[in-house]
Image: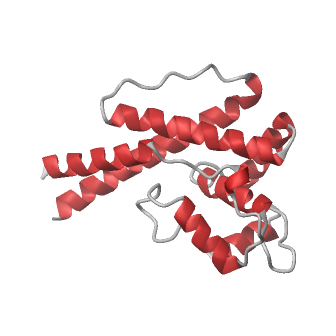
Amino acid sequence: MQQQMETKLLQWAEQTERFRLPRWNELPELELYMDQVVVLMEKSLAGLFCDKKSVITPAMVNNYVKLRLMPKPIKKKYSRRHLAYLIVITLLKELFPIAEIQVAIQMQTLQEGSGEAAYNLFCMEIENALATAMAEMQGKPQPQSNPAQPGNRLLRMAARAFACRIAATHEVILHRETMQN
């Protein structure tokens, strides 16, 4: 049983090590309706969250708008900018309360000079952190990275915390499932 769990864990780590978030220019140019946004988010984040039935719901999106965590949709349509906000919020809410996410988004956007640059850097840091955490789970040498600049330190630390959190959560869930069988 332990060997079966370890095999599943290593398979997940191999898959997750190659996980890639869509960059700004890869997000749809056409504006999307809510149901399309939910489908795209589920597809974009598939495989990361083993403990959730759905990554995002229409109610969550509406709450983020009400809380002014992201801009309002225009005529019930969501743009590339909204999608980037939703990806960032969905990942960071695993770590931070909403108020802190709002500050972190503002900080990084100011630091990078644009939402596009901040989002692309966020994607890169998440992917690097996942690759490092998954390499550790597999007993591989960890990829090297450049030291974080003071303006990017928060982002890098949050990305590492996210990667470690989902790795640990996945291992606990697999262990629980193994014990129940």
Q: Tell which of 113 and 97 is nearer to you.
A: 113
In percent of width and height, residue 27 lies at: 69, 59
What colouring style does the render use? secondary structure
Count of number-bearing discs: 0
Q: Residue at x 37, y 52 (%)?
A: 170
In the displayed structure, 175 sits above or below 159; it is below
In the displayed structure, 49 sits above or below 20; it is below
In percent of width and height, residue 139 lies at: 30, 29
- Residue 135 occupies quadrant: top left
In percent of width and height, residue 62 lies at: 74, 74
Q: Residue at x 62, y 72 (%)?
A: 38
In the displayed structure, 135 sits above or below 61; it is above
In percent of width and height, residue 165 lies at: 47, 45
Q: In the rendered view, does 54 fall on the left or right side of 155?
A: left
Q: Residue at x 78, y 41 (%)?
A: 117
In the displayed structure, 168 sits above or below 176; it is above
Quarter holding the C terminus is bottom left
